[in-house]
């Protein structure tokens, strides 16, 4: 395929007004795709239009921290470290007083709409090959298993599809969710997709080690796909073994659930089991391979469709363009039904802002409305990442969900010391394409690739593609500004104040999570003596000289002035800010501590972290050590910097 061509030499950074460092972004956000030439809209990122497609019908995974409301919520019960430890010792795997009917694994309501509706591979072998004219290949899990163990599980995920939590107690549960024993009703397959990796078209990728068991429809008619990651080779494995190690599986399991509890849209994780076998991995691709315990995560999502699911078929010529349309129809029918039911009376028409005064009417083309909603969901998701300091690490187009879910947890990381150039991925170090500050731009770039794919398939026009990108930009800025306003407890958005704060944090490498949590302790009293201004923040403003102290005092004075003008009491504002600024995030060193113990057969810390991350916005007395600054050992290679190898 021809190389990716940039449309212009200039680049657009959505966060540029807010961050102290400007990054060269390569490639630029707007491109002439190999699928379809696409010009940037001249009116991009004008003030937000008055109407847009609503995403309210999508089941939100947002928690307490996502509410726009500034009203405080009543405190939840707290737990101590000792009580958590005792709970783990005495824990039964399921509650004894389930009040509503729950299902056994054999009674789950399986459906296989993806397999029914879309073309499949006529072959069922796992020989690495190009799978043409098909969306999936039927393939069985094949990972070698010997005395598998259940490491961790999520009762709340089981509840999504009415599974009785007592099923986790079954002796055969590890066999079933390692793929060693077949699940009744399942119809396993691996999905075919492609994608751009680090800005370059990579061709066919696909589920190289993930096998979908099928879809379970719950009592609310919600559809949930179950997928085993690390369960063996598929035709899409290329030169890999299709397996996963305990190290990366613990990270994916814990972060899936932690992100959900932070209120961020994400895939979920039902269970984590060890295989009892070892897997050879070269973590840093430096020739130092070693054997690691194997493991399998059962991932759960309404759908695992990605941008790359559409790209691969658009890249293969005219005869596969109908597959793009079929995939779009499938997604709209099952996951965006409100778009299927739109009608002209809704009048979703918008001026494009072009000189010819042309109009985009979303009710006349369901694919355009669908594209706009995907763009907005993606923007909302990435804004929420920025809010908690989450860096994905590998935002390739094959890792972008059409549902706006965080997907594929590889070398992710939460910010410790605030550094806009932070990337958790050693593979990304030369250019830092996927660093924290670049995530909004990368999201836009990926949307450009997705819209180019749909344009190639004649599903949307260039103007509709441009409008979707405009909506991405507007939605991101709306969400980002609202989120930062809530994080600071401000009565209204203040660009200058926020920009200065982020600059100060970057200069002094201030801990991102702890700073915003402590900020709620600042009092809205303009009469506070200068020498007391920084007292609430002393735990995070470490080793700064007099000049930097003065810079911080100046900022706090401006901040206090804004707070005083709001008329909100200190107590009310503190509760509001603590509901959006987590005390606990899944720092890499916490994961590593749990991994080290688990590799020795002790899963207590994995389960304790899972319990802790269920309530990240609560104080949880006795658990304060999990909110501390990372220790010195946390910065050694392999803890804060990870490669894609897993």
Image: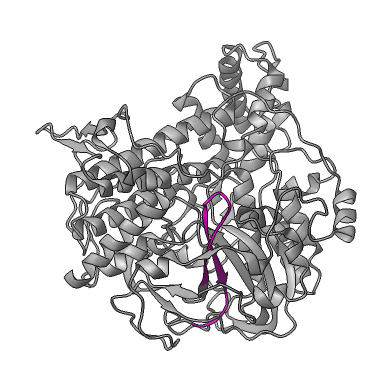
Q: Residue at x 57, y 62 (%)?
A: 109
Q: How many marks?
A: 0
Q: Is residue 227 left or right of residue 545?
A: left
Residue 153 painted magenta: no
Q: Is residue 224 part of the magenta span, yes or no?
A: yes
Judge left or right: residue 33 versus residue 329: left
In this view of the protein, which residue sits in the foreground, 165 or 354? 165
Q: Is residue 408 above or below residue 548?
A: below
In depth, the one of 145 and 134 nearer the eye is 134
**Residue 412 position in % (x across, y down):** 56, 58
The image quadrant where one finds the N terminus is: bottom left
Locate residue 399 relative to residue 87 in the image: left or right: left
Residue 568, x across and y down, in percent: 63, 15
How was this image coloured?
Answer: one colour
Residue range highlighted in magenta: 212-233
Q: Residue at x 36, y 53 (%)?
A: 333
Asked whether residue 326 appears in the rendered view, the answer is yes
Q: Which percent across, then down, holds residue 566?
A: 57, 14
Residue 500 appears anywhere in the view? no
Q: Of 313 and 480, which appears nearest the observer? A: 313
Taking the spot 37% from the left edge, 48% from the top edge, the residue there is: 374
Report x, y in % for residue 386: 51, 43
Quadrant of image for the C terminus: bottom right
The front one of 478 and 228 is: 228
Quadrant of the rendered image containing residue 151: bottom right
């Amino acid at each position: 395929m021809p190389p990716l061509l940039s449309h212009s030499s200039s680049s657009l950074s959505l966060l540029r007004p807010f961050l102290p460092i400007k990054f060269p972004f390569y490639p630029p956000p707007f491109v002439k795709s190999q699928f379809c030439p696409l010009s940037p809209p001249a009116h991009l990122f004008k003030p937000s239009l008055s109407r847009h497609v609503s995403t309210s019908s999508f089941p939100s995974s947002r928690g307490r921290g996502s509410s726009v409301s500034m009203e405080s919520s009543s405190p939840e019960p707290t737990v101590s470290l000792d009580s958590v430890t005792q709970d783990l010792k005495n824990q039964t795997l399921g509650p004894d007083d389930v009040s509503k009917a729950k299902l056994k694994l054999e009674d789950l309501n399986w459906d296989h709409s993806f397999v029914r509706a879309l073309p499949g591979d006529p072959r069922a072998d796992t020989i690495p090959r190009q799978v043409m004219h098909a969306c999936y290949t039927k393939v069985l899990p094949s990972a070698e298993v010997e005395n598998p163990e259940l490491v961790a599980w999520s009762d709340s995920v089981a509840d999504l599809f009415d599974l009785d939590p007592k099923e986790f107690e079954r002796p055969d549960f590890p066999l079933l969710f390692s793929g060693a024993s077949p699940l009744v009703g399942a119809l396993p397959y691996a999905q075919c997709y492609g994608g751009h990796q680090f800005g370059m078209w990579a061709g066919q990728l696909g589920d190289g080690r993930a096998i979908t068991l099928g879809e379970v429809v719950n009592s609310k008619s919600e559809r949930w796909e179950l997928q085993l990651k690390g369960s063996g080779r598929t035709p899409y494995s290329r030169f890999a073994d299709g397996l996963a190690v305990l190290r990366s599986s613990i990270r994916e399991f814990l972060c899936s659930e932690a992100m959900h509890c932070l209120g961020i849209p994400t895939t979920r994780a039902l269970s984590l089991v060890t295989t009892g076998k070892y897997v050879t991995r070269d973590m840093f691709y430096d020739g130092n391979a070693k054997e690691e315990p194997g493991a399998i995560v059962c991932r759960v999502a309404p759908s695992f469709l990605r941008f790359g699911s559409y790209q691969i078929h658009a890249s293969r010529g005219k005869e596969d363009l109908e597959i793009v349309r079929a995939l779009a129809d499938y997604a709209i029918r099952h996951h965006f039904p409100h778009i299927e039911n739109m009608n002209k009376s809704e009048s979703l028409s918008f001026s494009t802002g072009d000189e010819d005064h042309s109009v985009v009417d979303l009710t006349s083309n369901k694919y355009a409305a669908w594209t706009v909603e995907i763009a907005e969901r993606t923007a909302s998701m990435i804004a929420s990442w920025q809010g908690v300091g989450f860096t994905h690490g590998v935002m390739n187009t094959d890792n972008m969900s059409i549902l706006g879910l965080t997907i594929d947890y590889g070398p992710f990381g939460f910010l410790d010391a605030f550094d806009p150039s932070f990337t958790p991925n050693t593979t990304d170090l030369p250019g830092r394409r996927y660093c924290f500050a670049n995530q909004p731009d990368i999201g836009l770039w990926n949307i450009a690739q997705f819209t180019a794919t749909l344009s190639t398939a004649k599903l949307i026009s260039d103007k509709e593609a441009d409008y979707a990108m405009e909506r991405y930009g507007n939605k991101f800025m709306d969400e980002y500004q609202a989120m930062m306003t809530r994080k600071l407890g401000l009565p209204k958005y203040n660009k200058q104040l926020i920009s200065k704060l982020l600059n100060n944090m970057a200069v002094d490498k201030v801990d991102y999570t702890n700073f915003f949590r402590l900020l709620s302790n600042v009092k809205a009293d303009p009469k506070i003596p200068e020498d007391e201004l920084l007292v609430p923040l002393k735990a995070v403003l470490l080793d700064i000289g007099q000049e930097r102290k003065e810079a911080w005092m100046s900022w706090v004075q401006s901040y206090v002035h804004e707070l005083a003008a709001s008329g909100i009491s200190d107590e009310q504002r503190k509760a509001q800010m603590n509901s959006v600024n987590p005390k606990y995030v899944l720092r890499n060193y916490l994961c590593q501590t749990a991994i080290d113990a688990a590799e020795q057969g002790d899963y207590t810390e994995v389960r304790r972290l899972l319990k802790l991350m269920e309530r990240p916005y609560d104080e949880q007395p006795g658990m304060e050590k999990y909110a501390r600054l990372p220790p010195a050992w946390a910065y050694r290679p392999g803890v804060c910097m990870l490669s894609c190898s897993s």
